Image: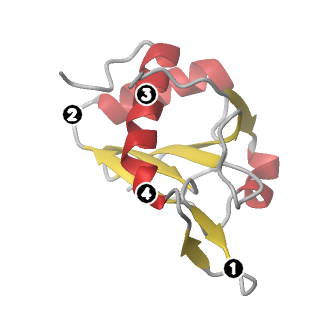
């Protein structure tokens, strides 16, 4: 298994945030390591500018949302990921393995069991992109 993830990120600016995020975006993993969320947030800000949401709460300072090209998320017609801080933890979230049914309720897809592997690949990808040690050996 390769840890490299070939994909194209399309940053979702704050003006488009509510059109991109769906009810199917669920937490992949929270990483609780002192200073990691702040460091990642600073690097994301340097690279992409203002985050996709303007957080008003103490427990959350940033949320960067990306549409992903090059990863199959069928039956969903798009793939969205989110990097945020939540109560001091770095949170990876995505709709990978989820879709919305006709009533707009989130339902698992056949890719649901692949979410941990997908998250691991995302961590490697962002570790390389941001030059921040996200994965601890």
Which of the two residues, 101 or 13, is positioned nearer the viewer here? Answer: 101
The vertical placement of 52 against 57, above or below, is: above
Residue 34's tag is: 2
Which of the two residues, 55 or 31, is positioned nearer the viewer here? Answer: 31
The residue wearing badge 3 is: 40
Ranked by sequence position, the earlier of labels 4 and 3 is 4
Q: Secondary structure at mark 4?
A: strand
Q: Which of pointers 4 and 3 indicates the residue nearer the eye?
A: 4
Q: Residue at x 81, y 49 (%)?
A: 15
Residue 27's tag is: 4
The residue wearing badge 1 is: 101
CA separation in Å, label 2 and label 1: 38 Å
Ranked by sequence position, the earlier of labels 3 and 1 is 3
Q: Secondary structure at mark 3?
A: helix
Q: Residue at x 74, y 46 (%)?
A: 14
Dots 4 and 1: beta carbons under 8 Å?
Answer: no
Crowdedness of circle 3 by 10 Å Cα count: few (<14), some, many (20+)?
Answer: many
Q: Is residue 9 left or right of residue 113?
A: right
CA separation in Å, label 4 and label 1: 19 Å
């Amino acid at each position: 298994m390769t840890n490299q993830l070939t994909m194209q990120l399309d940053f979702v600016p704050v003006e488009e945030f509510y059109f991109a995020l769906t009810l199917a975006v669920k937490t992949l993993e929270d990483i609780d390591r002192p200073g990691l969320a702040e460091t990642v947030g600073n690097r994301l800000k340097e690279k992409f500018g203002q985050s996709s949401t303007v957080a008003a709460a103490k427990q959350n300072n940033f949320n960067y949302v990306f549409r992903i090209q090059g990863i199959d998320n069928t039956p969903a017609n798009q793939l969205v990921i989110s990097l945020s801080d939540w109560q001091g933890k770095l949170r990876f979230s995505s709709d990978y393995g989820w879709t919305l049914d006709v009533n707009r309720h989130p339902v698992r897809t056949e890719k649901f069991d692949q979410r941990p592997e997908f998250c691991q690949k995302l961590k490697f990808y962002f570790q390389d992109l941001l030059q921040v040690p996200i994965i601890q050996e």
